[in-house]
Image: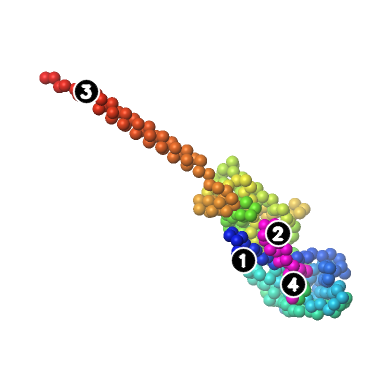
Amino acid sequence: MHLSSMKKCNFIFWITFFSLLLFFTGSSAFATSPNYGLKVNYGNNQIAQNGQIDVFGSPGQTVNASITISNQSSKDQQYEVHFYTAGTTDDGSYNYVKKRRPDSSLKLNLKNYIKPVQQVVTVKANSMQNVGFNITIPTKKFTGYLMGGITVSPYHQKAETSLTSNGTLIKNKYSQGLPVKVRQAQGNKKNPEFRILGVSPTADKTLKSRGVNAHVQNYVDGFLPDLSLQATVTRRPDDHKFKVKTTSGNPQSVAPNSNYQFYIDWGKKTLQAGDYHLRMKYTTADKTKSWIINKDFSISNADAAKYNKLSGIKPNYTWLWILIALLALILVLGLGIFFGRRNQQKKQPPMNNQY
């Protein structure tokens, strides 16, 4: 959401983000902020003591899960506790936030099988409080994972604001989180499967960059964290002179049945209209597994001009001016020759016909 300022071309962006502490280790360690901390209480259906609710159960079974909130302040505190279905950020990170449209491949949404999905909990000063959840294992068979996360934040907290050097107003709210993973059998493991839904040109006016977004989908209920990714764009057909390569700066942990936009930077190159091919390769950290996906796409003249301009590149009219100059020169020379011959003909004496 953004609001127009009183000055021309000045916009103030209100950005609310949550600092989610996603993965914690140790069976009794609290994930903490200056005022409160979280931990998972491991039950009989817990897969491993890995800092997250990672449970299994038979179809139709209700599994009880709980977390502990530690209030480390000297006053009673209230906390908002929410469950959200897992998704993927555009930098390829697994997360769980409120505003997200479910992926088209998601058939079993974990938020429909966990109760309550939201509650307000009061924790007395310098004490701990358990918060429980009932997870009903779906009767419909699935072989991978249903995933999401529980977020805990101070109730009615006031946002902290800061102003960046370019006039952007940042509005921060603090939150902590714990991942939730559900399976139908303790030994269930499933890898992700990827495909590219589409490729579209894009640009960033602030960073003065341009490139394309690859709309990638993990269309199954599989999950494998910390994948590396290399994306390569070439021109079709078989133009080896043009190549753009991008390597993911962050490990890719794509949530089951989710999609995201992976940005491929064009670097110093300008966007050119034409036909292209995208090849993306995901690889596990131990190099034992990889996934290769491909997609042909095209960039139109209109989109190339639009996004080049948006990224700060001014059109190069040098060849147009050269062409105009050449045409003007040809026109002047042509007129000169024409009028020169005409004047020469006028100066010649008339020929007398003899009989």
Residue 327, image x, y percentages: 41, 37
Residue that badge 4 annotates: 158
Q: CA distance from mark 1 to mark 3?
A: 83 Å
Q: Quadrant of the N terminus?
A: bottom right
Q: Amino acid at mark 3?
A: Pro
- Binning the other alpha carbons within 10 Å of mark 1 as few (below 14), some (14 to 19) or many (20 upward) gives few
Residue that badge 2 annotates: 164
- Drawn side of residue 337 relative to residue 3, left or right: left
Inspect this view and state whether residue 67 appears: yes
Give the SS element for disc 4. loop
Which residue range is magenta in the image? 156-181
Q: CA distance from mark 1 to mark 4?
A: 20 Å
Give the SS element for disc 3. loop
Q: Amino acid at mark 1?
A: Leu
Q: Nearer the viewer, mark 4 or mark 3?
A: 3
Q: Earlier in the sequence, mark 4 or mark 2?
A: 4
- Drawn side of residue 65 relative to residue 170, left or right: right
Question: Which residue is found at the position 70% from the left and 53% from the top?
Answer: 248
Q: Amino acid at mark 4?
A: Lys
Residue that badge 3 annotates: 349
- Binning the other alpha carbons within 10 Å of mark 2 as few (below 14), some (14 to 19) or many (20 upward) gives few
Residue that badge 1 annotates: 3
